[in-house]
Every structure is written in C-alpha cells, then in structure tokens.
Image (cartoon, grey):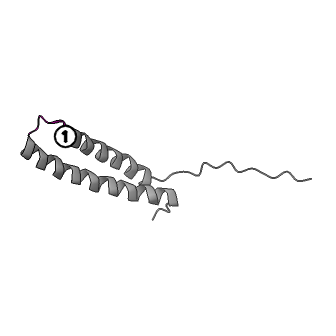
C-alpha cells in the first residue's frame, strides 16, 4: 500500500467533497431545468457548476492518489 502524505490525504478528501457537490448540482440543475426551463441563466450556472466540480474532483483525485516523489532539497551541513 502506498504511503500518502498529509497533503495528499486532504486533497483526496476535498476531491470526494467536489464529487458530492457535482452530484448535488446535477440534481439542482435537473430540478430548475424542469421548473423554470433550460433557457434560464440559473440553469446555465448550475450546469457550469457541474462541469467545474467534476473537473476539480478529477484533478484533485489524481493529485491525491499518485505516488509523488520527495522534492525537498537535502542540504549537507558543512563540517568544520
């Protein structure tokens, strides 16, 4: 099993939250699309939010699940 750092764990949790928000906006856009029509700017903004949250969720999911190398610079202390 891969060892994930704290930042990757937090990123993965935020990705799941983005997926949940995307599903919520799918439900909201379906509701408002049937109530006020698909020509409304409210429906368009909810549909754009679906694309945004699912796109952000995919990016954060990948960032949270890949094996990232350690990019810290290891400095050697000079010896006197």
The one nearer the camera, 5 or 39, is 39
Task: Determine whether the residue tagged by mark 1 lies in a helix, strand or loop.
Answer: helix
Residue 63 included in the magenta stretch of the image = no
Q: Which residue in the rendered view is the most extreme toward the bottom?
A: 1
- The quarter of the picture where the N terminus appears is bottom left
Q: Identify which residue is drawn at 39% across, 59% down.
A: 13
Residue for badge 1: 42
Q: Quadrant of residue 37?
A: top left
Q: How many marks?
A: 1
The percent position of residue 54, horizontal first and vertical second, equals 29, 47
Q: Residue at x 85, y 51 (%)?
A: 78
The magenta-colored residue range is 37-42
The spot of residue 38 in percent (x, y) is 11, 38
Could you say where residue 44 lies in the image, as x and y percent from the top left?
19, 37
Question: What is the crowding at mark 1: few (fewer than 14 residues within 10 Å), some, or many (at least 20)?
Answer: some
**Left/right of residue 48 with respect to residue 9 in the rendered view:** left
State left or right for residue 34 relative to residue 15. Answer: left
The foreground one among 14 and 69 is 14
Residue at image point 81% right, 53% down: 77
- Main secondary structure of the magenta stretch: loop
Compare residues 32 and 70 and report the one nearer the observer: 32
Residue 37 in sight: yes
- Which residue ends up furthest to the right in the rendered image? 80
Taking the spot 40% from the left edge, 50% from the top edge, the residue there is 60
Q: Is residue 5 visible?
A: no
Q: Position of residue 65 (x, y in %)?
A: 42, 55
């Amino acid at each position: 099993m891969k060892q994930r750092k704290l930042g990757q764990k937090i990123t993965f949790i935020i990705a799941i939250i983005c997926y949940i928000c995307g599903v919520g906006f799918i439900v909201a856009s379906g509701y408002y699309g049937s109530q006020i029509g698909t020509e409304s700017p409210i429906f368009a903004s909810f549909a754009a939010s679906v694309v945004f949250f699912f796109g952000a969720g995919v990016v954060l999911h990948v960032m949270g699940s890949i094996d990232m190398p350690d990019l810290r610079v290891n400095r050697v202390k000079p010896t006197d």
